[in-house]
Image (cartoon, helix red, strand yellow):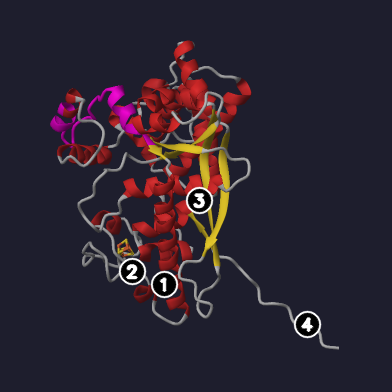
Amino acid sequence: MKLPSRSKSYMIPEYSVTGDLLSYLTCNLQYRYQNKGTLPPSKPVQRWFGEFIHGVIEEAYIQWEQNNMHFPWDWKKDIRPIEDLIDLRLQVRGLYPFDEDLFFSIHNQSDEELTIDDLNEHDHKKLASARAEKAINIWGKDLFPLIDASEHLIKGIRDMPNYDENTSRSNYYGINGVVDVSSSVKINKTLEQSNFDNYNNRIIEYLKKDENFQKRIAKFDKDDEYEILIDYKGMKRPPEKVNNPKVENKWETHEQQILTYSWLRSEQKSSKPIIAGIIFYLNELVPSKEDLILIKDELNNGLTDIGYEYDKDIELINSWQEDDKAPELSDNFKIDRSIRIINVDEYEREKALLKFDSVVSNIEESLIKEMKGCKIQDAWKGDSDERTCSACDFKTFCKNNSVKTKDFKIP
Ligand code: SF4
């Protein structure tokens, strides 16, 4: 009797929106070393803050829902224990902040005598704590009541671009992503209610002011439900225009991320029409020195979309020097810059998906070259701006490094 042989294993390559798309667009070669080679960055501070702020907001939402808490929250009593919990969770995964970014664990140091005044955002010593406090007290109070689901894993499948049965690894590929928050609202009702109850939900107010959003909801009835996808980012608002072709256009890639999420979500049975996405750029609530340098440059060169009407804030930023104390910017300036509304329309969504396909096609092409014996640095294109290269762990041996490392010495 002839026993049938087991068929060849069939695996569909999976790509994630943040882990692959955003990372590949920063630098193809760095992506290869970090993601495909699973070499974690040696100083993952940026990653630490991103994960910290996501963890803090998610935990704050759970506590708000369970304990029906009112705002503003007291930093020491309500927020500090959450920071500590998230910090410990990240430590288990080997992620640590810079010393000055966070008040250290209660277990390491008594913080009996700490007060809200110690959370002095203007000396920029305790950035992560200051940002967590502002994120919860400024946005949490309007965001939490709108949340329908948080940390929502969404997946989808697409045809493999440029599929070739002899060389391609699979005829499909999978996309996955985690939406920070999805909010299902009867928007016309909510908009009416916000006028009626005298309850000015700031997020709804921003949606009301957005002309494109208004045009889209005009097609809906009062009782129609639809969804808004929300994402928070532990970074400043990126510039709308980028002059250097080597610099990744984060403005566009964030829009692509929301549009791709909206397609993934629309593939799920329980979804309602997705009308918009909102991104919160949380660093804008307490900008660091590096953020202020960039904000100053972008405002002076017309590269950003928000802030020009705030004459007093512009004056403060322009007269501020790097060694000075951070300027006391107005809340309205900071809040306006921290929220971005992205309208979801079919045409833009299709464009974003084609872009994702082309990124996957490039990654697959480089992987196949490598599988055929091509050297890593020849199979993947290393090309990035000075800022990214100078923070890159691979700059000492990368042929395409844009910063000079001739002074590098092995200790
Ligand atoms: S040094 Fe620059 S070009 Fe080379 S891998 Fe790193 S980011 Fe990419």
Q: In this view, does 70 lie above or below 354?
A: above
Q: Nearer the viewer, mark 4 or mark 2?
A: 4
Q: Mark 4 points at which residue?
A: 4
First of labels 1, 2 by sequence position: 1
Give the image location of residue 118, x and y in percent. 37, 24
**Could you tell me how far apart the alpha carbons at marks 3 and 1 are, in whole angstroms?**
30 Å
The amino acid type found where label 4 is placed reads Pro
Q: Name the residue under label 1.
A: 366
Q: 10 Å neighbourhood of mark 3: few (<14), some, or many (≥20)?
A: few
Image marks 1 and 2: residues in contact by CB distance under 8 Å: yes
Magenta stretch holds residue 86: no
Give the image location of residue 99, x and y in percent. 39, 41
Image marks 3 and 4: residues in contact by CB distance under 8 Å: no
First of labels 3, 4 by sequence position: 4
**Could you tell me how far apart the alpha carbons at marks 1 and 2 are, in whole angstroms?**
9 Å
The amino acid type found where label 2 is placed reads Lys
Q: In this view, does 133 lie above or below 240?
A: above
For mark 4, give the secondary structure. loop
- Identify the residue shown where x is 41% and y is 51%: 44
Mark on residue 381?
2
Does residue 82 appear in this view? yes
Mark on residue 244?
none
Image marks 1 and 4: residues in contact by CB distance under 8 Å: no
For mark 3, give the secondary structure. loop
In the picture provided, is 380 more to the left or to the right than 157? Answer: left
The boundaries of the magenta stretch are 315-341
The amino acid type found where label 1 is placed reads Ser
First of labels 3, 1 by sequence position: 3
